[in-house]
Image (tube, rainbow, N blue to C red):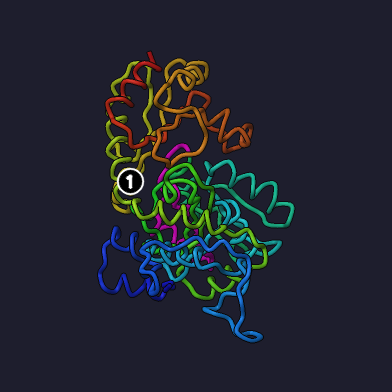
Amino acid sequence: MTHRTSEHADRDQEKGAGFETRAIHAGYDPDPTTGAVIPPIFATSTYKQDGVGGLRGGYEYSRSANPTRTALEANLASLEQGERGFAFASGLAAEHTLLQAMCRPGDHVVIPDDAYGGTYRLFAKVEGPWGLEHTTAAVSDVDAVRAAVRPGRTRIVWVETPTNPLLNIGDIEALAAVAHDAGALLVVDNTFASPYLQQPLVLGADVVVHSTTKYCGGHSDVVGGALVVRDLEVAEQVAFHQNSIGAVAGPFDSWLTLRGLRTLGVRMDRHCDNAERVVRFLTEHPAVCQVIYPGLQQHPGHAVASRQMKRYGGIVSFRVTGGEEQAVDTCGRTEVFTLAESLGGIESLIEHPGRMTHASVAGTDLEVPADLIRLSVGIETAEDLLADLDRALG
């Protein structure tokens, strides 16, 4: 069996291989003994050594490295065009490991003023008591982010684009310049866009974060997270802390995520197709007062999104005319859209952010509108999705 490292992933890029080709082939060559085209699940905790210190392929203990996880990490590095990828047990595990690796008590981080609730909780309730300070700023306002930076103390400018759930857009190139001028790293949570629609490292970011639970896995059957970095010194720090903290992706989870990545391109195209149909429907519906989607020309981030994204994604947020009660009722009346948290799976989901995913930020600057509904548009038949929304809104 042959596993390809990130160096092999780089060679795939140098050969000019397309995204879908790399999604299928990067990180793994067919097994030289059996010819298996899919990497096996290495359900092992330890590895036989050929004499003391005689490791086979560098494998010693599966917290440190596992061949299935190695294949996933190399594949992710190739798709994001980074130097190294790292797979974790969840997106928050990836975030925590990165912060522990790159920050120290007394350091400062700028985060979005509409960050994912779990990310905000991590900064406020876990990293804050440890000594890491944070300031919020609108990712769509480069000047506001610059003003939030504390020269000499800001270690990371943390960006989501599109943000969750208000779908604000940050200009990655401009924000990279702000971060680098201050001697800080630009970290981009690329979960909503996926590597298929947006590649922040190419635009100047230093680290990409993913909840691979979402579009990368794509089937709502695995929880995971990932980091991809473009600098080897950062990679060394992340690798040390990944091993030391130990919140790594298990072999089966790695296998499921790698399986999902192989179809990412075709799934994202269908997600986007369906989302665009849903947006057109909602903009004409009398019960809807605002549709939030970067693909709309009236969206304030449309021009930036058009420049840095291939398409505009599968997440649609909208506000209803009847306020919070109507929003909650609508979420409970759908039949094809499933009322559930999370996003990015093949099935369509609907949720009320104010009471569900973003309940933890109620009463803070990150509180979301009470009449907001968020859709994760799946890959079902578009006409069925539209009929379901029409019935629920009616």
Question: In this picture, which residue range is highlighted in magenta?
Answer: 165-191
| Image coords of residue 321 (percent x, y) | 42, 17
Q: How many marks?
A: 1
Image quadrant of residue 177?
Answer: bottom left
Q: Is residue 144 above or below residue 46?
A: above
Residue 179 seen from this side? no
Q: Is mark 1 on a helix, strand or loop?
A: helix
Which image quarter holds the C terminus? top left
Residue lying at 54% horizontally and 59% vertically, measured from the top left? 251
Circle 1 packing at 10 Å, graded few (<14), some (14-19), many (20+), is: many
Question: Is 197 placed left or right of 128 in the picture?
Answer: left
- Residue position marked by numbered label 1 in the rendering: 268
Amino acid on which the number 1 mark rests in the picture: Met
Query: Of residues 185 and 380, which is closer to you in this image?
Result: 380
Q: In the orientation shown, which residue stands out farthest toward the right?
A: 129
| Image coords of residue 13 (percent x, y) | 31, 70
Q: Is residue 173 magenta?
A: yes
Which image quarter holds the N terminus? bottom left
Q: Does the magenta stretch include residue 234?
A: no
Residue lying at 40% horizontally and 35% vertically, measured from the top left? 347
| Image coords of residue 71 (percent x, y) | 45, 65
Query: Of residues 76 and 289, which is closer to you in this image?
Result: 76
